[in-house]
Amino acid sequence: MSSGGKTILVVEDEQDLAELICFNLQRESYSTRYASTGDMALEQIRKNPPDLVVLDRMLPHTSGDEVASAMRKDSSTSQIPILMLTAKAEESDELVGFALGADDYVTKPFSMKVLLARISAMLRRGDSPVATVEVLREGPFELDRTRHELKVNGQLIGVTATEFRLLGVLMEASGRVLDRSALIDRVLGKSAVVLDRTIDVHITSLRKKVGLDQPDTSPAGWIQTVRGVGYSFRRPQDEE
């Protein structure tokens, strides 16, 4: 595994765990920095942005959720990948993390091999070539890859890098149904170590951001579930 000279900020209030993560990252030739609180993390991120943030969700005072939200609201840090660590394992907790800006999610206790594989996959996604179609427009949606912007009905919508890639893949499919395995391969990478429901969680978060999750009465209706198969991006039936 090649680090490509990437710098990773580890934000974790359990010092022993933070040191273990940093040690293993350094063995893979990553540069590491460490912050034990959310406030320290935000200060470091703004002064010297890392290539990726490993972020504990349950931090004292300023929580990991608040750090992720602040990063996504700041244009200078909005595109930095975030891998959240948490002791919670319920899907509702994952949805909160993704909605606030996490790109991936690992629950404690975790395998260090899994953590390293997730980090490597996330960084590779960021280094992958830009798709040939730079601006996608369909209905109320405009996805601009050159600016990394999503507009819905002319309004800028803040989404994570993973959600941005996911919507781009669905829009390029032009109404074709893509199963979850295909979406994982094209959005997260063939080597991604994730469950099929990870795509479902990202889709749910994306729908909420673009239309308050009302499939037949809002732009979210364009992101359609094909039961037992996967997802498709196409015009809602009530607009045909």
Image: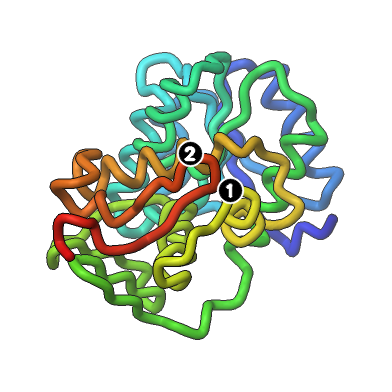
Q: Amino acid at mark 2?
A: Asp
Which residue corresponds to mark 2? 200
Nearer the observer, 235 or 23? 235
Q: Residue 204's x, y, as percent? A: 37, 38
Mark 2 closeness class: few <14, some 14–19, many ≥20 residues within 10 Å: some
Q: How many marks?
A: 2
* Amino acid type shown at disc 1: Arg
**Would you say 24 lies left or right of 130 here?**
right
Q: Nearer the viewer, residue 151 or 27?
A: 151
Q: Which mark is residue 146?
A: none
Mark 2 to mark 1 CA distance (whole Å): 8 Å
Contact, mark 2 vs mark 1 (Cβ under 8 Å): yes
Q: Earlier in the sequence, mark 2 or mark 1?
A: 1
Mark yes or no: residue 51 visible: no
In the image, which disc is placed on residue 180? 1
Q: Which residue corresponds to the image point at 80% horizontal and 44% vertical from the top-left?
A: 26
- Indicate the quadrant where residue 167 lies: bottom left
135 with respect to 240 (left or right): right
Name the spot of residue 163 as percent of width and height, x first. Answer: 43, 52
Q: Residues within 10 Å of mark 1 (few under 14, many from 20)?
A: some
Q: Position of residue 25 (x, y in %)?
A: 77, 42
Please name the residue shown 67% across and 57% down the image: 189
